[in-house]
Image: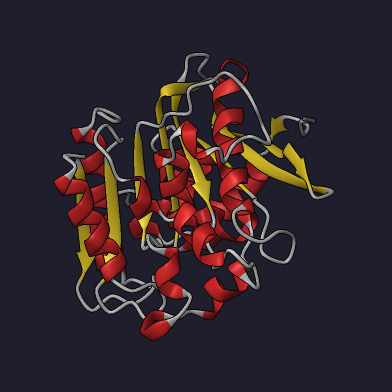
Amino acid sequence: MTEGKRFHYPLLCAVLICGLVPNPALADTPDSASWAATLARNCRVTPGITYLTANNWEAKLDVYQPTGTNTPVPTLIYIHGGGWVGGDRQGAFLNAVPYLEMGWAVVNVSYRLARISLAPAAVEDCRCVLRWVISKAKDYNFDVNRLVVTGHSAGGHLSLTTGMLPASAGLERQCPGNEDLNVAAIINWYGITDVGDLLDGPNMKTYAVTWLSSLTNRYAVAKRVSPLEYVRPGLPPILTIHGDADPTVPYTHATRLHEALSKAGVPNQLHTVPGGKHGGFTDEETLKIFATIRQFLQKHHLVK
């Protein structure tokens, strides 16, 4: 695995933060430009690290680190959405910026989309990201006891599988190692929890059909990559955020996961956005969501 060049990148951070991130989602500050400049001075980026090569395609990630500390820091693994068929890590990165503001490290991930490899490739890649993060913890000051994985939509699904899969599922065999692939928490933004539900019937979605395509065993693969199949006692705490009017990922995917986790005794929480669609929440709704996230992280001793 090759690694990208590590360097200070304050201009990039400033452009990202000042120009594109809505202030209410980030911090209570009267001067967002001053705040962004302060954060930019404390941002170090290592872009374009190849963590895996599969199907002659290099899977890459970017590492964002707070400067001024040599001790391990809480670390967020961010996985972009796009229905497993689109999206990219650069376009979705702004969703992870609030964690930089908290002084966390962020690992921003690319994975194989359907045009490169069908299911379960994306799940395999994200499990390999987790192994990479744990194996590189000393190099980047990642705190392996405070790893949180999150993502939106398909990224929410991949966050769930990344944090929930047992080793017995065998979905990290392309990156073998001895590390225990554990996370401290999962924050699932309207992720798919039952892939087979989207292949036929009233909840059929084109993106899911494309991801499974014409695989002869597509229902077996769909089951293998569905978070609901892996609910069991001992999982990390899980927070799910979902609008109850989501036309893209049915809200029932959130409620079924919440019910199954609660029945299994897994610490979990469902934050429902009344009338919420597939993202695009208002500033007020976003503020409430991030307040819920912070309370969730505090409850599980991941922030003070």
Q: Residue placed at 48% from the left, 75% from the top?
A: 199
Query: Across the whole image, how many numbered discs are drawn on residues?
Result: 0
Residue 282 % position (x, y): 31, 72
Name which quarter of the figure residue 113 lies in: bottom right
Residue furthest to the front in view is 216
- Colour scheme of the rendered structure: secondary structure
Residue 12 % position (x, y): 65, 48
Q: Residue placed at 18% from the left, 56% from the top?
A: 259
For residue 33, say whether it is visible. no
Residue 202 % position (x, y): 37, 85
Q: Is residue 36 left or right of residue 146?
A: right
Residue furthest to the bottom in view is 202
Name which quarter of the figure residue 143 lies in: top left
Name which quarter of the figure residue 54 lies in: top right
For residue 167, say whether it is visible. yes
Q: Is residue 169 left or right of residue 131?
A: left
Q: Quadrant of the N terminus?
A: top right
Q: Residue placed at 44% from the left, 59% from the top?
A: 152
Q: Is residue 289 above or below residue 168?
A: below
Q: Is residue 262 left or right of residue 70?
A: left
Query: Which of 194 and 39 lies nearest the eye of the viewer?
Result: 194
Residue 237 % position (x, y): 27, 39
Q: Is residue 83 above or below residue 182?
A: below
Q: Quadrant of the C terminus?
A: top left
Q: Is residue 191 above or below residue 31?
A: below
